[in-house]
Image: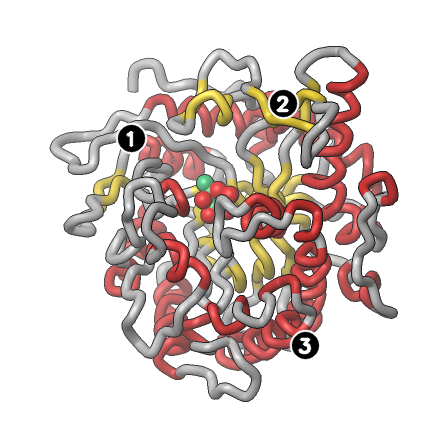
Amino acid sequence: MAGTPEFAPQALQTLRRLRFSAATAAFQIEGARTLGGRGRNIWDDFVDDPGKVIDSSTADPGPDSYHRSAEDVELLAGLGVDRYRFSISWVRIIPDGKQGTEPNAVGLDYYERLVDELLAAGVTPEPTLYHWDLPSGLEATGGWLNGDTVHRFGEYVDAVADRLGDRVRHWYTINEPASTSLQGYALGDLAPGRAMLFDALPSVHHQLLAHGTATKILREHGAAQVSAASNHSLILPETDAGADHAAAAVLDLIHNRLFADPLLLGEYPDLDALGIQMPIRDGDMELISTPSDVYGLNYYNPTTVHGVAEGPLPFEMVPTPAAATTGFGPLWPIRPETLRDFLIDMRTRYGVRLPPIVISENGASFPEPEACTGPIRDDERIAYLHDHLEAVAEAIEAGVPIAGYTVWSLLDNFEWADGYTQRFGLVHVNMETGQRTPKSSYGWYRDLIASVRP
Ligand code: FCB
């Protein structure tokens, strides 16, 4: 294709070491919110609250993967990915999230079928156990602010592992705990939509404990690879002014180190300056830092901040200078070299404590039509993915251990509070009909994977 970016031979050589995957999440693709004995979660509550989702869409039917998973598996097989990162909906398994509830066989059957179809197609399943969809019954008793939620999560993980643990060996525990704590509980622009600022921080500790608890259970069921999928961003000061550097250090602390330090070092960074106390009990930090086989890392863009002298937060996010932006505009700049720099920083910060990194999400949305009337030439997405993979190759060449790369997303889907206004897929989905049409980025990713295989 004219204008398709090429990899340098050395970069292609380096990329041979990676396992390739594509990702989705249950609430974003399944639809069927009231079928199969499924209970309600905080995203059901969020989408049913008028005004919360920008286009008033409800994720139902959306891509309707509850009924069309066989087509998804066919698309994955055609892509030639090694793995598929999808998520399991907690409320399809334990409808009210509560203690003692019998697991819902219909929900377990659904994921078992998907796993079997993937295995038959030669694609390794790598499910995420929690991708933002907390049972509403647990949010009613405090959600991730309540330590009891950790135990309920353990029961749910146990039920899933009992059914699937003989065939699924690769797991993600918690997706983007930073997004849940910062955007869900501190600022309120994602479910559960609470705006507690720094009072939200116990939700960090409980999600990390849930990760540790799940890791232990999954290992007992013979898992070969378990990790969280932590979202990170290189934080840049707007100017060289001391106040901007100080603001960048605070955001780096609460967005990056607050999650990576406990997972990798078994301790929180110094939070005294922020006046924060975590509800730590004996044994918690050991559980949280149970060694992981890989470090799942979601990366999309850098974040630029400037210092704010007075206000509830000591920083404010401002647009990052960039030649191009994604469908989200100025706050989602395209700066692939910041991924390389962040990966190198991870190696510098954590040294030998850092296991091989798997990029568990990376991708971009661009304006695309709702109905597909001809081929979709998504050259901007191809350039984004190419440039970020080149950044990954550079980081590997600089000595960072990296084992895998995952495109977000296999399919256009429900982009949370942005509804259907942001399309991230390698495959276009008509949200009225569910029809799937591969975009040119699908062919590009397929050809890349084929070209780095023996
Ligand atoms: C990540 C989420 C994922 C998707 C992408 C665009 O933060 O994990 O579900 O929405 O952003």
Q: What residue did someone put label 2 on?
A: 304
- Residue 440: numbered disc: 1
Identify which residue is drawn at 65% across, 76% down. 151
Q: What residue did someone put label 3 on?
A: 220
Residue 446 position (above or below residue 120): above
User: Would residue 5 appear left or right of 312 to someone viewing this image?
Assistant: left
Percent across and percent down for residue 36 are 30, 76
The amino acid on which the numbered mark 1 sits, given as a three-letter code, is Ser
Which residue is more in the foreground, 358 or 150? 150
- Secondary structure of the residue carrying tag 2 is strand
- Secondary structure of the residue carrying tag 1 is helix
Which numbered mark, 1 or 2, is in the foreground of this view? 2
The amino acid on which the numbered mark 3 sits, given as a three-letter code, is Glu
Decide: few, some or many residues near mark 1? Use Cα within 10 Å; few <14, some 14-19, many ≥20: some
* Label 3 or label 2, whichever comes before in sequence order: 3
Residue 116 position (above or below residue 351): below
Identify which residue is drawn at 50% across, 86% down. 101
Quick one: which residue is furthest to the left in this view? 373
* Residue 12 appears in the picture as rendered: no
